[in-house]
Amino acid sequence: MADNYSITLDIKRYDPDTKKTWFQSYKLDAGRILRFVDLFRRINNEQDPSLAWGSSCEHGQCGSCAVRVNGKPLLACELLVENAVKDFGTTKFRVEPISIAPVVRDLVVDLEKAYEKVHRAKPYLIKRAPLPPQSSYYQLSPKEIERYEDATRCINCFSCADACISSHKNFIGPNAAMASIVRLMDPREEEKEERLKLLYSEEGIYRCHSSKACSFVCPKEIDVAHFIALAKEGAFRGDNGE
Amino acid sequence: MGNKLKVSTNLSCDVLVIGAGGAGLRCAAEILEKKPGASVLAVTKVAHPQKSHTAAAQGGVCAVDPSDLHDKPIYHMFDTWKGSDCSADQNVVKKIVETGWDQLMWLENRGMHFTRLQGGALGKRTFGGHTSGFGSVSSFRAVFDADRTGKSMMDTCWQEAVKGGVSFVPQSVVTELLFKEGRCIGAILFKEKDGEFVSVLAKATVLATGGCGQVFRITTNCRDNTGDALAVILRAGFPVMDPEAVQFHPTGIVGPGILASEALRSEGGILRNKDLEPFMEKYAPKMKELAPRDIVSRAMESEIRSGNGVLNPDHNIEHVWIDLRELPDYVHDVKLKEISGFFKTFVNIDPKKELCPVRSSNHYHMGGIPTTEFGEVQKTSDEIIPGLFAVGECASASFHGFNRLGTNSLLELFTMGKFVGERVVDYIKDGSLTELPKEAGEVTFSQFSKYLEASGKGNIGVIREEMRNLMTAKVGIFRKGNEMAEAMESLNELRKRAEVVALASKTTKMNQDLHQRWELDNLLDIAMITTKGAYERKESRGGHYRDDYTERSEEFDYHTLAYMTEYGKVDLGKRPIDMSIFEAGGEHCEHFKMIPRKY
Ligand SMILES: Cc1cc2nc3c(=O)[nH]c(=O)nc-3n(C[C@H](O)[C@H](O)[C@H](O)COP(=O)(O)OP(=O)(O)OC[C@H]3O[C@@H](n4cnc5c(N)ncnc54)[C@H](O)[C@@H]3O)c2cc1C
Ligand code: SF4
Ligand code: FES
């Protein structure tokens, strides 16, 4: 393993003032454990302060930094230079915004628009199941939770939606669908009909072609396709439910 | 171009919540529960409230479970008081602790996910400083959701806000507060996507913008934690309380500063310097790696200062090692799976085989906008600003005094969020909207046009990095009078340098350089008051450690109020520490006097 790499980033840029799109090439010498967000910051500090890119936590926990690197959607805060070189077998990278919403500038996309789908899926408890008598909260066994726990780890980075071959048409998208599926699996949710109506609607899960691209790219290693498959079967509550 | 800046839209609402993290949105939810149909706008700097930094909290949230026979609210109050190094306000401590469990249930009932025990009850953990019986044994007081408690809480908060009908204003920042006859009547926002300034008239305004860790080079805080609301408050002529009360965590992963839990040390991880010497023996011969956070942090920094650190060339940060190679596979693969995973993900290191680089990292700001126990913002120690509230890490009520216990922050968010929401509902009952003052936006436009008109050399990011390095070196874990005096001079110079920098582009639309230019001014403001507060506090207390005054001193038994209307000219005032539990003279009150913080 080298200590340093000569990296070229071909970054797709967009200027909303002129509506122009172009690729701009930046060359950097980068240490092995710098992450792509660190490279973007260095471009700002050393070469071009006008490049806009998104990030917040830089801990892989907020999903603000998803970009496409050589065609693959991933979190820029988790991509180390040395892993990128190894995984893609090159030191030249094409970096583009994810395609799930209009671009605001350069790598920044309008996540507000993308989230409309997640809101439409009503990620909250629509109608709480009544509390058992004399308890202040719901008792849920780890076994019950285990069935859907993985899906609760979704950070809405929209990488899956970017990779999904169906989500650009009318599909609500893998992560939004999963947000509703989680609540169908959560014993604390009483409202099922409304959820099923959405999931089986025109924009619902039958738009999914089961390509499993979502599971393949998810940085949280959530098997998104598995949850969508459960929904297609209507297997929300396992053996103790319906 | 600069002189063309103007307010392009006028909005109005019942309540303007600035900052949509755990605290802001819990408050918004309360307002809508108590007053359904109220119009609530929640502004966030990030792309969506879910991206707020509360989502990064890992370990847990504490509250005293009434069904736990070993635990009592009075123990939790004591731990918080002692942990704060006797500078938390006891009225606030009592209020938060007593409602903790009910409010946790509020979250659970609304769908927050938790790690559970076999029977279905909430699982619990111990955390440093949390005890039963006034320090006699560790208590299991923290509930959690694996290593993502903050995310689960954040999710419930934004989901409830969506459900309740809060309107979000994402990717926008508050740049100015509006006042009429001493009352806060709204704010000016900069909507970055559109590059537009909007005015918002509100019956009540709540500040909930979170921490300001970006003041330091090495921090666990997110890129957006630049202390904006604190700077906005200063510019309006109001104070920030205890800016010098900053907490550092011993083990941040180099270089992203990701928090690696204390569990690493309790499971047997050993800290080593560049010669691989296990140095904790020198600093805490008995407790070694298990000594409290601040002692471990200081030991690590001492090693680095005396040339025993190791330089990471990629991030250009000096660090020490934590050696996890001797831990059993079970600990790596099961017990500490997530943390081991962090080293793999962020520094490509296999902790089973290699040494892991760690450095003490800035972690939390105990200080903030001074408020009453209802979140009303104060302009002096006994006067409030009607219509203006603050909650969460940007506020200081003060629940944490000079040192926060792990898991107490998340607790504060949703308890104070509720209290502030209640107070706001009460306040807006007979409130009405006023007209937009003529001068609305002047502060903002004079600031932003200067940024856009500057035509000199320099780079905003570089100045930001220099400032952060300066603060980590001179106002960090060790503080010394002469070094802080130097730091204040350097800050003045950095600010002058920043003033002339020509931006790469003069557009206002999603102009990251412009955004960072404004943030830099905020950071420089916070850096200055932090340094001045620390300089004048000639004692050591909680997270504030002075090399030249190593003990706590009675003389400083108060909160600092720092005002700054002209850069570098900081006026300091005082607010007394509330000791109402002690003064009430009830059972156990003797534990609430000024006691030593010894563990
Ligand atoms: C890595 C890490 C781990 C932690 N673990 C724990 C833990 O286990 N337990 C615990 O109790 N505490 C923990 N903490 C502390 C705790 O997470 C924070 O103190 C808390 O989440 C802060 O919440 P908040 O709502 O005040 O702010 P945030 O969640 O940061 O939200 C601030 C909001 O304000 C917005 N904002 C910021 N500036 C502006 C502006 N100018 N205009 C408009 N909006 C703005 C932001 O976009 C965001 O929406 C941890 C902290 C870190 C960094
Ligand atoms: S499922 Fe995975 S890829 Fe999709 S949004 Fe959630 S975290 Fe991102
Ligand atoms: S910046 Fe938060 S996930 Fe990358």
Image (cartoon, coloured by chain):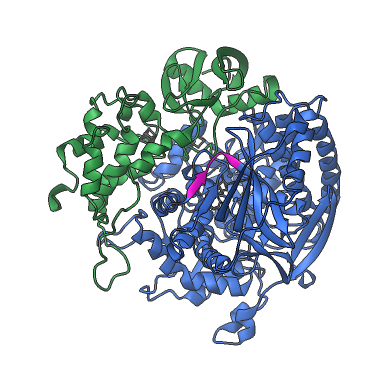
Question: Is residue B143 found left or right of B523 in the rendered image?
Answer: left
The quadrant of the picture occupied by the C terminus of chain B is bottom right
Q: Position of residue B307 (x, y in %)?
A: 72, 38
Nearer to us in this view, A215 or B230: B230
- Is B229 in front, or is B385? B385
Q: Which residues are magenta?
A: B167-172
Which chain is blue in the picture? B
Location of residue B495 with respect to A83 vertically, above or below: below
Left or right of A62? Residue B462 is right
Q: Is residue B201 above or below residue A177?
A: below
Q: Is residue B170 magenta?
A: yes
Q: Name the residue rendered at 46%, 53% in the picture.
A: B59
**Residue drawn 61% across the image and 14% down it:** A26
Determine if the magenta segment contains residue B239: no
Q: Position of residue A184 (x, y in %)?
A: 24, 48
User: Residue B201 in the image: x percent, y percent?
Assistant: 62, 53
Q: What's the colour of chain A in the image?
A: green
Farthest residue toward the front? B435
Q: x, y (%) of residue B259?
A: 53, 45
Residue A33: tell me if it is visible.
no
